[in-house]
Image (cartoon, helix red, strand yellow):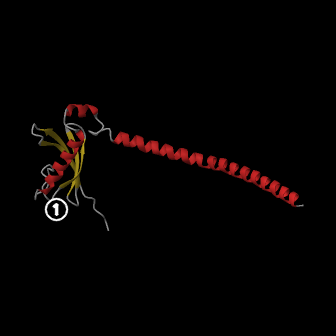
Amino acid sequence: MKKSLFLYLFILAAIMNVFTYAFFSRKSSEDEKKWEPKLKKANDSTLVLYNKLVDEAYFSLERNENAQEYLGNYDYRKLISDLSDTILDMNQNPKGNSLVPYEQVNDSKFIINKVKVLNHRWIIADFNDGKIWGEVLIKYFVESDNKFTFERIDSQLYQPQTTEE
């Protein structure tokens, strides 16, 4: 009697294991099918964002090997850092940054917020005075003593938008 009870319990456990295995195998394959389109879409979105990032970085000294070769021994990473620091330090001028061609309006001076080194010769920078925004295109030269000379090429000032109440 005891042997047959153990035999029945063993058979019952084996059957339960087979059904459990079948259930979870089917559920796993259904989950894969369910998530496959979402995973494909996420991978496609990631690829689109990566391609957009590569396109955005196209006009950058970091990606321009010809401009890097033009610089010779000057490390382009250090150059970008030095240029940015030099331009942002020019914001300390009481009348505003001298690379911005506009005079101070009201109590606020124009300061440069962001700098992007485009290649071995040009920089684009964003500036504002808190209310008025603009951009300036700058030509730069690296002198023999590793000092910089800047020449403003052009600038664009955006008129503040008025809000109607």
Outermost residue on the bottom side: it is 165
Q: Secondary structure at mark 1?
A: loop
Q: Position of residue 116 (x, y in %)?
A: 25, 45
Q: Position of residue 161 (x, y in %)?
A: 28, 59
Asked if residue 22 is positioned above or below residue 74 in the image, the reply reads below
Identify the residue shown where x is 13% and y is 43%: 150
Closer-to-camera residue (110/28): 28
Identify the residue shown where x is 51% and y is 47%: 42
**Is residue 56 toward the left or the right of residue 148 in the image?**
right
Identify the residue shown where x is 28% and y is 35%: 64
Q: Position of residue 81 (x, y in %)?
A: 22, 46
The answer to which image quadrant residue 147 occupies is top left
**How many discs mark residues in the rendered view?**
1
The three-letter code of the residue at mark 1 reads Ser
The residue identified by callout 1 is 108
Closer-to-camera residue (108/83): 83
Identify the residue shown where x is 63% and y is 46%: 33
Q: Quadrant of the C terminus?
A: bottom left
The answer to which image quadrant residue 109 occupies is bottom left
**Is residue 28 toward the left or the right of residue 71 in the image?**
right
For label 1, the crowd category at 10 Å Cα-Cα, with few meaning under 14, some 14 to 19 and many 20 or more, is: some
**Is residue 33 toward the left or the right of residue 123 in the image?**
right
Outermost residue on the right side: it is 1
**Is residue 65 toward the left or the right of residue 104 in the image?**
right
Q: Quadrant of the N terminus?
A: bottom right
